[in-house]
Every structure is written in C-alpha cells, then in structure tokens.
Amino acid sequence: MHNTEIIGLSSKQVTASQKEYGYNIQASQKSSLWSIVLRQFGSPIIYILIFAVLISLFTGDYLNGAILSILIIINSVIGFTQEYHSARLATQLNNLVKKEVLCLRDGKYQSIDTTGLVKDDIIKLKLGDLVPADAIVVESNNLQINQSVLTGEVENIPKINSEQLLSGTAVSLGTATAQVTNIGAKTTFGRIASLTLNTHKKSEFTRTMAKLSSGFMVTGFVYLVGIFGLQLALGKVENWQTSLIFVLALTISIIPEALPIVTSLSLSRQAIKLGKLGLLVKHNTVLEDLGNMDILCTDKTGTLTQNKFEVIADSYSPKLLQVAQLLSIDSLESFEVAIQKYTKELSQIQSGQETVIEIPFNPKLRISAKKIGQVTYYHGSPVEILGLIKGQEAQTKIQIQEAINQKENSGIKCLSYAVELGGQWEYLGAIYFADKLKPDTKTLIQKAKNLGLEIKILTGDSLAIATHIGLESGLIDKAASAISAELIDFDQSIDSLYLLLGSYAIIARCTPENKYRIIQALQSKKVVGYLGDGINDAPALKIAQIGLVVNTSSPIAKETADIIMTDANLHNLILSVEKGRSIFENINKYLKSTLSSSFGNFFTMGLLSLILPFNPMLGVQVIISNLITDLPLVSLASDRVSRKDIRKPKHQNLHRLILICLLLGLVSSIFDFIFVALNRGLPVGQIQTSWFLFSIMTELAILFSIRTRGFFLLAAAPKKTTVLYSVLALISSIVISVYLFQFIQIETISPLQVARLAGLTLAYFVISEAVKFVYYRIYFNQATE
C-alpha cells in the first residue's frame, strides 16, 4: 500500500494517470458511421439487388444495371438515415445511465462517476454495490461477493483483507474499503466484455417477428423458384435475364424489409418520451413486452404508498429511542430517516475508543445490528427480534406480539429493538411508523384494472399490514385475497403454484427466494414485470421479462433491470404500458399493410406471369414501387393510436395476423384480375406501367384502412408525416408513370388512364373496408390481436 490509504490520490495524480492509462471504460458496441454504412449492404434485399445488377451488366443491359444501382444507393441512404437517427436516440438514453462510487480523493471521500476511476484509487463498497474495477481488499467487514457475472454460479464468496475483487462482481453482504489495481479493458471483466457486452433478453415480440420474417423469405424463395421453373418449362422465357430480374424483384416485394426500421424508430421515440417522464429504458426492445405485460409484481412501499415514513408519537422509553437513533446513523432508508428526524434532540450513545462493527441487514432473518465493544444492538421485524430474545417468558412475548398485531391491522409498520451483552438479552420495545397512500393510488389501480393489467404485491411486511393497504387502496375487496408466503408450498410444481397464485393479489412475508419462485410460476403462462429495489431482488429482476427498479436502488439491481425509474410512480408505469401497446399497434399496422398488399400483388403477378404472354410488371418497376411505398409505411412508426386499441395486453397472434393479411390480399388479387380484364386491350408497356401505378395506389389506400379496426373516418387522425409522405408517394408515382418512364425506355400512360386507376382504387378501398368490418366485428366479435 502507498500513502493512498491515508489521503487517497490527489487531483494531479488522477489527471496524470488518466492521460497515461485512459478512463475506466469497457469495450463498446456503439455503432460508428462506417459500421452503419456497411450494414446497409448486408441485408438479403441488397444481395438480391446486387445480383440483379450483375446479371444486367453481364448481359449488356447497362441502362437497367444503372437504374438498379441507383435504387440500391437510394435504399441504402434511406436505411442509413433512419438507423443513424435511431442510434443517436439510443446514445441519448445510454448517456442518462450514471454509475457512481465512493472514492477517496484529496483526503476526503466523494461520489464520482465510475468511468473516472484510476489505478490506486481508494474506494468504499457496501451491500448492493457493483465492483467498478479490479481491486484489492484493504479493510473488510463481513464481506461477501457474488461472482455470477463471471462464473455463472450464484454463490456468495467471503473475502478478507488482501484478497482480490473482480470488476463486475457484486457485494452481496457487508462492506469493504479497496484499492483499484486495474481499470477498463485491462480488468478481468474487460477482457471478456466482447463476449458478454450488451446482452439482454429478447422480447416475445422480437422472437415472433424474427420467425415471421424468415418464414416469408423461405416461402417467397420457394414460390418464385417454382414460378421461374414453370416459366422455363412452359417456354414463357424469351429473355431469361428480364424474367430472372422480375422474379428477384418479386422476392424483394414479399420481404417486410422496413420492419427493422419501423421497430427501431417506434421503440427509440417512445423510449425518449418515457425518459422525459422519468423512466430510463436500458434496452429498447423491452418496450415491446411492456405492451404484452399481463401482471406487474411490486412491493407496496413507494408504489401504493408515499414511502415517506413518519414516527407515530407514543410513550417510547429514552433507551429505546437512543438505540433506534444509533442504528439509524448514516442510513438513507426512509424509516431510518424518520427516526433521525424524530430523535434529533436526543443525546447519542457514544462508542469512545471501542470498535464499531456493522452487521448489515439480512433479508432472510429480517434484522440488522451494530456491535460496539461487547454490546450488540439489534432491530428488525418484531417476529424475528422476539425470536432472538432468550430468557423472556412466553406469555410476555405473546402479549407483545398481540399489541404489535393490533397496530399492524391498522396498517402501521412496527420495528422492534433489542440489546445483547454476554448472552443476556433485553427487549427494548417497538417504534411505530405511518406511510400514507399516495393520493392517486385508488384511481391508478382502477386504471390498471381497466387496462387488463393485474397488480400483485410481493412484500416482506406482515400479512396484516399488507392486507390493510390492499383493502384501503382498492387493490383487493376482501382479506381472503391476501396470503402469507409462509403458508405456500414453494416446492410444488410450477403449474400448481401458478394456479394457487391466481387466487391472491397480495403475498406477504416474502423472501427473495419466494419472489423468484412466484415470478417463475406466473411467467410460465403470462408476461410478467417486476419492480424491485435491493440486491436481493436481482435474481427476480433478472428472470422477469420486464425488470424495473427505482433510481435509488442498489447498483446491482439497476444493472440487472431493463427500466430505471426516477421514483416508483405508478402513473408513469401505467403510461409506459400504454406506450408499449402503442408500439405493438403501430408495428402491426405496418405488417398488415405491407403484407396484405404483398400477398395480393406477389402471388397474382407470379401466377399471371404463367398465363399472360408477358410479365405483368418489369422488375425495375417492382423495385421502384417497393421503394416509393416504404416511406409512408415507415411513418407508421409514430402513428396515433386509438384509446380502445390499447385497452388490453397485446400478444402477437400470427394466425390472426396472417388470416387478415390473406383476406385483404385476396381482395387485392381479385382487383388485380379485374384490372387485367379492364386493360387487356392496351399495349404491353402501358399495362405494365398502369399496374405499377395501380399497385402503389392500392398499397397507399390499404395503409389508411388497416391502421384502424373500425371505420377509417372514425379512427384517430393519422400523423401529418404519414399523410405528407403518402401524398408525396402518390404524386411522385403519377409523375413517373405519366412523364418520367419514357427517359428509361419504359412506356408511359395518360392522365385519363390515371383517373380510371383512381376510380378502381376507390372501389378496392371500399371492398377492403367491408372485409375488414366482417373480420373484426362479426367473425372475431371485435376481438383484438
């Protein structure tokens, strides 16, 4: 040890060290501009387009090759712009995450950002802290470390002076003073960071969408290989490269290529909005599961109640108050702060030269203590404190417990105190606390019920207190809806436990292990969110599909969670659920719109290419139409959502999604055949250009129909951006069809033909609205997906 153990490093030493060794920062997966550019050329769609370009160049069709090359550049620029915007939003969110540690600098301890740590810094660690860098223990007090982040084994390892602490591990018990030995990429954690960096749970929605996208790609590929093979077999291929490019273009049209952009923008924008409300979303994809959340498990304190404990005046003995004051020193726990305020005029118990040993709170025993010399002062749950007392008559204990029960039945929290010296115990009594309900608790609980969100309280408090709060808040309407965890057999099967828990909204006297098992059981059938705070909540936070913590929670809890809240504000939490459901709705709007159009055009054009003596559309036209309609579809990421569409938890039902897309795709196919019948006398070039414009018109029309389950005029008004992009897409497609195609040797159509196509599109829109009405209002009786 250097003299750093006395005064720590000086500011000059810190500056010099940072210049030489840098900052305590792990490897980052932050996207550079160049990596974003490269990703635009890594999608299957780009591969297909590049293949089409090579075919054109190989056969000497340089004009078609040039057009396709320009389309690749345009597609990549749009993709780059959207991804770069999303990356900037994600960076803004990550910058809000602060990790601090108590560090000895210039002779005094101060809270600093962990990125500012340097070698030889002296740091203090307590229960729940993450070790911010590799370090050596200088002083320890009952120190135990959880190394599961490195070993995968959930085991608490005792540590004594001179033993090593590894970056990324967590303090699971006790306290320590340590000296930093390695920082950043040189730490043990830093060396393996590239293997574990930014890993997190994939949402249910993400997994479903991945299956959907890959399914369409495989289906489309198989279908079009079959079409091309039949064209060859039937002698329909006069120009093989033209036919091949047409088939490749159709393959592109069936892939929902803008889905990643729509998803990313929806998530990033809503995450920024929630950040302004005090909810920091660490992993954007968790917002998808927020819309799916069926059950929210949380403690009552700070969620239903104000978490502003006040000591209730009573005839407390001076010794009881002095001991309570002693045990509350330097604590930020709300009930300890209340004691500090209540006892501020009292003289303190002096330790003199005697050693003071802190015995941290033990969540299993529900007690903590402080030992001064030979005397140990305890406080904690009345049941546990009374259980420690030896030599006291059983009848006296019963009377004490009955008095406490009366208080708890009124919702009053009780904290008991005792002193032990040489095996002799003295029960000092209990201090009583009040924690009032938040003014809006009843309203918010009713709102949660209206949204189909079930709230379950998992608390360490007694059954009496939890039941009183549950009844007062309106969470439960009868005491039978609450149960003590001590009465539950947690060794029973997951299915049996799930059925049992369905009868209760409140589970009292929960240990961390109980909470973990409860969430595990509920999650076997439902999507579950858990709002926790301490290190002992970390296992439950990790297993829950949505882990939430308050900003004042322990570092390990914040590291494990998906969302960090400035406070346990139930209003903002419910709002985040609504935002999650809005994201689900908007992504589904995009899917239904693009897939219903794709189903119709994709299958119809493939079949008609076998019947007609020409391809229904040129490959270049298919690609251009796909590009033009992408921008209006992407704008759905920020579309308005009707209140009635977010009344229930959202779960993706692929069967229903595909069914509505097939039904509307069938309507599209029918109108494609009507289009061919009405235009069969036109020259081939005009039919192809007319179909190009008609396909864009119908896709824009279905966008405004499918964005609501009801009559489109009664829906929430679309965003101006959606209207603007749709109008621009329509105008640009008309201009291209009437005037610009001639410059790339494609036949144009007249304004009169455009008017006829508009009339046919109107008829298509009316029939699509009717089919949608039958699907939602009759067949599924207004069921939502």
Image: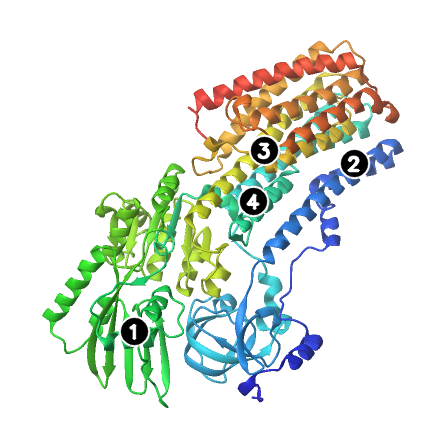
Residue denoted by label 4? 270
Relative to 243, does residue 519 appear above or below in the rendering?
below
Figure colour scheme: rainbow
Q: Are marks 3 and 4 in contact (CB under 8 Å)?
A: no
Q: Position of residue 639 (x, y in %)?
A: 58, 34
Q: Which of marks 4 and 3 precedes in the sequence?
A: 4
Q: Mark 2 belongs to which amino acid?
A: Leu
Q: Which of marks 3 and 1 precedes in the sequence?
A: 1
Residue denoted by label 1? 324
Q: Mark 1 belongs to which amino acid?
A: Ala
Mark number displayed over residue 591: 3
Q: Quote the CA–CA distance across marks 1 and 3.
A: 61 Å
Q: At numbered mark 2, what does the secondary structure look like: helix, strand or loop? A: helix
Measuring 45% from the left and 54% from the top, which residue is drawn there? 548
Q: Which of marks 4 and 2 precedes in the sequence?
A: 2
Q: Seen from this angle, which residue lies furthest bottom?
A: 353
Crowdedness of circle 3 by 10 Å Cα count: few (<14), some, many (20+)? Answer: many
Measuring 75% from the left and 16% from the top, which residue is drawn there? 754
Tell us which disc is closer to us: 2 or 1: 1
Q: Is residue 52 left or right of residue 224?
A: right
Tell us which disc is closer to us: 3 or 4: 4
Q: Mark 3 belongs to which amino acid?
A: Leu
Residue denoted by label 2? 71
